Amino acid sequence: MGIFSGKNKGKKAVTAGAKKKKNNFGKYVRRLWLLYFAGIAFIALLFWLADHDVFGKMPDFNELENPKTELATEIISSDGETIGKFYHQNRTPVKFTDLPPGLVHALVSTEDERFYDHPGIDLKSTFRAIVFMGKKGGASTLTQQLAKLLFHHEGSKHLLKRIAQKIKEIIIAIRLERQYTKDEIITHYLNTYDWGHQAVGIRSAARIYFGKEPKDLDLAESAMLVGMLKNSSLYNPITRPELVRKRRNVVFRQMLRNGYITEKMKDSLQKLPLKLNYHPELHNTGIATYFREHVRQFVKKWIREHPKADGTYYDIYSDGLKIYTTIDSRMQTNAERAVREHMKNLQKEFFRQGKSNKTFPFVKLTRKQIKALMERAMRRSDRWRVMKKAGIPEDSIRQSFFVKQKMRVFSWKGDIDTLMTPYDSIRYYKSFLQAGLMSMEPSTGFVKAWVGGIDFRHFKYDHVDQGARQVGSTFKPFVYATAIIQKHLSPCDTFPNTPYTIKAGRWGLQKPWTPKNAGGSYGGWLTLKEALANSVNVITARLIDMVGPQPVIDLAKQLGIKSEIPYAPSIALGTPDIKLYEMVGAFNAFANKGQYIKPVTVLRIEDKNGKVLYEYKPETRDVLSPQMAYVVTNLLEGVTRYGSGARLRHSGMVNSPVYKRIITGYPYKFTNPIAGKTGTTQDQSDGWFIGYVPNLVTGVWVGAEDRSVHFRSIAYGQGASMALPIWALYMKKNYADKDLGVSDKPFPKPDGIPVNLNCDKSSKKNDSPSGDTSPLDNL
């Protein structure tokens, strides 16, 4: 019994120990479960707290529907090209249908393989990001990346804050998935990402890195952009092309892994170079830079005058407006190339001649006058203004202009890095000849090309609409038109080419006025058509004496000229300062059957949703009858037939040394009807040519910033040498592009012409005394 009793006692002790051990294990299990559920509850609490804005405000439905992203304002040409943007962030959204399939496949393969299968989060990658604090991968889904881009951007270095941000990111991602389709999320993500170099959003990235729209991206280009998503600062094709190429090839491997391309395709694609076509979209670069600045001022003025319903104002830099303009990008390109081709040669000749001028670039100025002129230039400079505002004494400011500094300056061969004093840089820039060109459609008033200067980066002044310059003989058609209308003259009526004096006391003259013909040649009788063709001053003086200055002024004002025109007979020879914009608008009425149309540049403005905010209304008025407008046009055709504009047609001067040095593309050999007028001002400070065909009117001005900067010789300084070649080059380029539809037909002749027009002398040479004719016309 005792033995068995001992055995039972031992058995009971073992059983008790086992039970105790079992109870302890159960306690551990219960604790683990409790810890597990507590962890879940804690995480749930964190999500609940985040959802109730404890960790910071969460976006509501409206914010998710309309996230606050800055959108660039687009300037769109009449042929549908984006010619410029205004922005804080260069973002222009596109639709999913604008994205090439290869881009979408590359994006999903590389950034989120299970994108179409998950509800916005991938639990495995999310917990990994929380546990490892992002060291083994961050937000792995595209939706989470979009949430981060839209609502909290960069992560914090603090652990708790990073966890809070990750929780917020997950909640936002789930909300985004509920609110948007998968395609919309992809589109939104690509429209939001910043690829660097002002390329915010896929459209800007495609245009800046490849010079094309997103829908035109090929697979290699798409893969490069997707590869940059890892870190666009590090994977930058401009600074680290080889690194970007390797990253692009990783994208190809991912596409193979996901079945979007074959092994053979991958191998061939990986061998391709990057093939960048870098087009930075900056305000100072690209086409139509001067015009874009004109548009910006137009829209800013409109915004000030048209607040929103809530009293706030549109923001031209962030509201994603679309500005539809009249500019034709093809004509604009032709105009800019024409200006560049001619001005490059003209400037070279100007510098060559300046070597013999000790006061270059100034002509006929004393050293004292030059010193005064440069003093005014220094005081108008940004440098003087900034230093003056900082409280620096004027003597110290002036001295700073004579200390050499490193600077980059303009040249026709490209910008030059040099060491130069600010004083010398001002004088250097004053030595450059400037140009302005404006081209418009007669029947609509639409401005098709606008070139305000030679380089917007270095010369901001717009010579189309900012500056008024003396117009010279381009004013004479207004005198002729007035005389023909009031005195019922005919282009075939003749007048003596002899000196003519308007007596003192007449038309407010203080003393007698006797204008002279250029070259001092007189003799014989000339028809009005011959006189205008060769800009004969004495006959123009007779005409204004017949009608008086006021009717001429009135006609000019009716033709849209707002610049001041003094009451004096000397206006007949073009003494008023008038803007190129106004002169082209006035000549346009002659081509438009006598109806003036205010030049139009902006057709309409839309908000980001396509709602029309502004639409132009034409401003028109009838100034001349169609018959009288045709008579003036007929007169102006004589200029290009046998007058100062005849070099548009003839090739007899091609061997002239002048033309070899400065004229590009000569002889022009136009055969179609062209009406136009050259103009040259005193001392050759300004050269003009305004010419037109039935459906296009174009004006060109060439001169320097200061009127004391000019050619010494009229051979180089007249309008026919400085401005006319730009017009000719521009029109040749336009005619070469048949899609532009520039007319080469005769001007349509209305019925009921009241005067005789059959007085042309087809064999007439440029041997009439003239105010605009170059000695070269007889070479």
Image (spheres, rainbow, N blue to C red):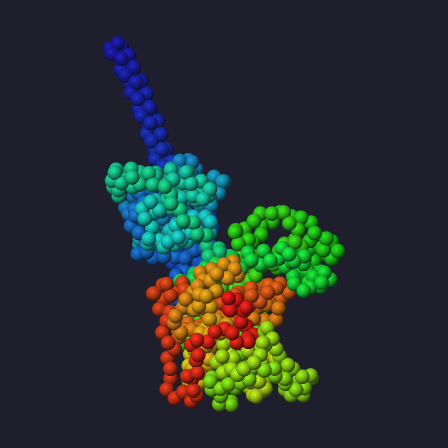
Residue sitting nearer the eye, 426 or 179: 426
- Which quadrant holds residue 398? bottom right
What residue is drawn where x is 45% and y is 48%?
A: 196
From the viewer's side, name the closer residue of 621 and 602: 621
In the image shown, does 203 or 13 lie closer to the viewer? 203
In the image, residue 83 above or below residue 232: below
Percent from the top left, x then y, of residue 665? 44, 60
Furthest residue to the top? 3
User: What x and y, as percent, mark residue 65?
Assistant: 38, 58
- Determine whether, in the image, residue 745 is placed left or right of residue 468: left
Residue in view at x 47 percent, y 62 percent? 654
Q: Is residue 446 visible?
A: no
757 relative to 359, above or below: below
Give x and y (percent) for residue 87: 48, 58
Drawn side of residue 363 relative to residue 665, left or right: right
Q: Is residue 464 above or below residue 594?
A: above
- Which quarter of the rendered picture does the N terminus lie within? top left
Which is more toward the observer, 62 or 742? 742
Number of on-image labels: 0
For the point 67% across and 58% down, the residue is: 359
150 lies left or right of 120: right
Q: Position of residue 602 (x, y in %)?
A: 44, 69
Residue 410 lies, with reference to residue 673, above or below; the image says: above
Q: Is residue 8 left or right of residue 564?
A: left
For the question of whether residue 699 can be seen, the reply is yes
Q: Which residue sits at x=55%, y=56%?
A: 348
Image quadrant assignment for residue 251 = top left
